Amino acid sequence: MSLADSETLLELAKSRRPADRERLLLGIVELCEAGGAVEAMRQPKVQALLNSIFLSLVVEAEREIRRRLAEKLAHAAWAPPALINVLALDEIEIARPVIAASPALKDHDLIRLLVEATIEHQIEVARRPNLGAPVVAAILNQAEPAVLAALAGNPTAELSDADLGRLVEMARQLAALRSPLARHPRLTGELALRLYVWVGQALREALVERFRLDPAAIEAALAASIGEAHGGAHDGEGLPVIARDGEQEAMERRLIDKLHAAGQLRPGYLVRALREGRLSLFCTTLAMLGRFEAEHVRRVVNSDRPELLGLACAAVGIDRSVFPSILQMVRELNGGRPGGGQEGARRAAGAFGPVSPQVANAAFRQAALSI
């Protein structure tokens, strides 16, 4: 690294402009890649330093910057696992490249994503190349239809004959499994015969041609399964992905917990959440920063008393000059709430009086009880 390069990074570190933050993040990545000594980069002290630097920058980074960073780090063997796990819990467009390829994500990390993340994240886990047997077992046990369909379409996953047998049996009820299973490179003739019974005509022809299925065996299988062969069967190729109620909020809480545990959750994260249109993330972050009850924050956001939102923001260190923008963005995302109009906004600004954050925190807690 040249002196000129180091001076450039130092200048970028002093800037708050998004473009400069992006240049700083990518510059650090290029610096790490130029180092070349992967084993040295994996030393605990180096990893701790890299993790601290990256997380401190990522927490307040714009969505596009995080997406670029995820793409750059997706294949990096030196990337800090804590940072990669945070990116893997981000929005799916940001998380996708690291879930698909990052060597920093181990089997236990992927299994945790199956439990903690949204359906979209789980599908990306199931599509990951060379997926290990423990993760395959977790997907089969969880039995989420859309994730099972992604697993069935992953030819490199470590599926045993027993695993394939379970998928074939599940295909009786889940039409979206049938087409990828019929094309699976490890499908056996015996499993093909079982699958034949409940697929449509086009897939039957493909199975007969691929495995040269014995007509007598086919007839026997059909006879044994009479009454089931056409019971609701169809050649459905797709399966709608419907998010479970509350799963996005639950994933956001886990992300906030990770950032807080790493000491990287700061008031600027509130502004980032609102700019990205994520009101629930804003509420979760505000509750964590102020150690408030999450339900109290939600009530305040939905009330006609914006001054209480002002108290909460003052309690966590938001500057008076920033709050009007926060209030406006919250109202835009929440149907005009908290209400009160311009008069309410004026009262809210008064919450940033000559009091300490500790006093504002206590005042918010007391007032929130009455809503």
Image (cartoon, rainbow, N blue to C red):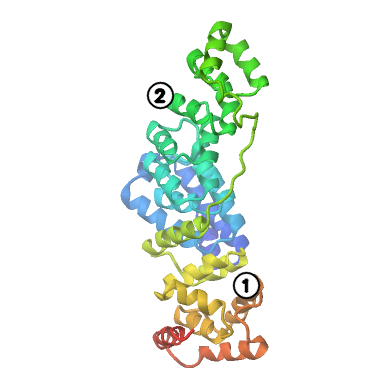
Q: Quadrant of residue 223?
A: top right
Which residue is drawn at the image coordinates 57% and 67% (left, top)?
279
Q: Secondary structure at mark 1?
A: loop
Say which residue label 1 marks: 334
Does residue 124 appear in the picture of this structure? Answer: no
Which residue is drawn at the image coordinates 42% and 21% (left, top)?
161
Image position, residue 309 (x, y; %): 53, 81
* Nearer-the-camera pick, 4 or 311: 311
Whether residue 197 is situated above or below residue 274 in the rendered picture: above
In this view, which residue lies farthest toward the left?
A: 44
Does residue 259 appear in the picture of this structure? Answer: yes
Q: Quadrant of residue 291?
A: bottom left
User: What is the crowding at mark 2: few (fewer than 14 residues within 10 Å), some, or many (at least 20)?
Assistant: few
Image position, residue 26 (x, y; %): 55, 52
Image position, residue 362 (x, y; %): 40, 86
Whether residue 260 is situated above or below residue 4 in the rendered picture: below
Mark 1 and mark 2: span between their CA atoms? 50 Å
Say which residue label 2 marks: 162
Q: In the image, what residue type sits under mark 2?
A: Ala
* Nearer-the-camera pick, 99 or 222: 222
Mark closest to the chain's N terminus, 1 or 2: 2
Which residue is drawn at the image coordinates 56% and 49% (left, top)?
92
Whether residue 215 is situated above or below residue 81 in the rendered picture: above
Q: In the image, what residue type sits under mark 1?
A: Asn
